[in-house]
Image (spheres, rainbow, N blue to C red):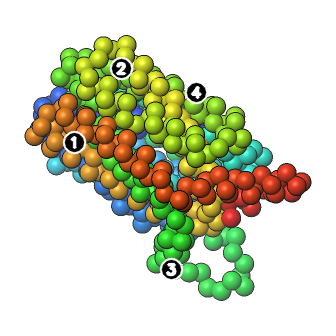
Amino acid sequence: MVGLLAAMAVSLTGTRISAIALPWFVLATTGSATQTGLVAFCEMAPYVMVKALTGPLVDRVGPRVISWSTDLASATAAGTVPLLHALDVLSLPLLLALVALIGAVRGPGDLAKEIMVPEAAERSRVPLERATGLSGMTERLASAIGPAVGGSMVALLGPLTGLVLNAGCFALGSVLIALTLPRGMGRAAEEALSPHDGPEPGYWRRFGEGFAFLRSEPLLLTIIVMVGITNLLEAAFTTVLVPVWAKESGNGPAVIGVNSSVGGVAAIAGSLVAAGVAHRMRRRLVFFGGFLLAGAPRFLILASHAPMWAVVAVFAISGFGAGFLNPILGAISFERVPRRLLGRVNALGDSLAWAGIPLGGLIAGAAVASFGLVPVLLAGGTAYFLTTNLAGLRPEWREMDRLRSGREQRLGAGDRVASSDLTT
């Protein structure tokens, strides 16, 4: 668990640094919100597409190998950007190509680390909610440290310095996965099949098995649609709306880092609470309460021209609510998806949930250019509020707590259930 969480921490921290450095580099050099959104699109579109298609490959090869190899490729591509800029040969098309490569290899790398969480929980003998809570806390910790470091480095040393650090973080993540995980962890799912199970299924058959399973799970599909919409709004917010707000208000990139880091620290607190007590809480109530705090308030506070102390306070409250979301989402997924299907099902589910992210920056950039920042912020906050609250009226959400009740009754009767049993 320690090795996996450490690798997740350093690679995610690098990604968060890049999330500030890269948009600010494009915005500062071109002055165009549209081109800033285009760069975000060129990173996230390959991320989503490749992640969707590599689920069977991750199951076949094994998440450990996929994780360290893709992190190494990400480090190489990220380090190439400042090198070419220093040589004065970095054109916009070349930058877009490198960013697309980073996104393409990040997708399977993130997936590989994600699906090793239940195995790490089993080896560590901890409840699944606690393991997903620790994973969520690690992500939130990266969201606190990365923006603070990224914002400071961009303000003091320039945005390309942040990309150099991003490359170093990916390289370190690759080393941690390759050297620190126990022998045999993260092996291929097909290795567990018996020789009597018949010939090994091909790629498209494995892909179809994941799609068929996901289609048979109404709760997972409902979650994916709702999170897909909120992810689109989050992408618009972080890649375009916040940088434009920082520039128009005169606060600069350092304030982007401060707001993100305050929200990240608060989210760590939420994730710590979730890791400690989430297995005793009613999931549905906590889930929608977290979204109520995490979503619309941030859009509205930036649109209100409120003083900085109020902006920071709202980001802190939103971050605390967000800290409860990923532990619940992760536990539901790992409970309902069989271990041998985790790679292909999570790849499809994550890709569908992230499908709107590449469009978020494009839509926000075009909308800000057409209507101005404040109307777009108000529209985004309203859409976020309606999406999360209207989705909560659907009947599938009862399964969140119903599954929990059945599991607790089995455990209360004295059953000794391993984490691998819970995921099936």
Q: Residue at x 14, y 33 (%)?
A: 372
Tell me the amino acid under the disc marked 1.
Ala
Given this view, does label 4 or label 2 mark the residue nearer the observer? 2
Tell me the amino acid under the disc marked 3.
Arg
Residue 402 coordinates in the image, percent (x, y)? 67, 56
* Distance Cα–Cα, label 1 vs label 2: 21 Å
384 vs 280, left or right, is: left
Residue 267 coordinates in the image, percent (x, y)? 52, 30
Name the secondary structure under disc 1: helix
Which labelled disc corresponds to residue 205?
A: 3
* Distance Cα–Cα, label 4 vs label 3: 42 Å
Tell me the amino acid under the disc marked 2.
Val
Neighbourhood count class around disc 4 (C-alpha, 10 Å): few under 14, some 14–19, many 20 upward? many
Tell me the amino acid under the disc marked 4.
Ala
Of 282 and 37, nearer the camera is 282
Which labelled disc corresponds to residue 90?
A: none
Dividing the image into 4 quarters, which one contains the N terminus?
A: top right
Q: Tell me the residue that label 4 is attached to.
A: 269
Which labelled disc corresponds to residue 311?
A: 2
Q: Tell me the residue that label 1 is attached to.
A: 364
* Distance Cα–Cα, label 4 vs label 2: 19 Å
* Distance Cα–Cα, label 2 vs label 3: 50 Å
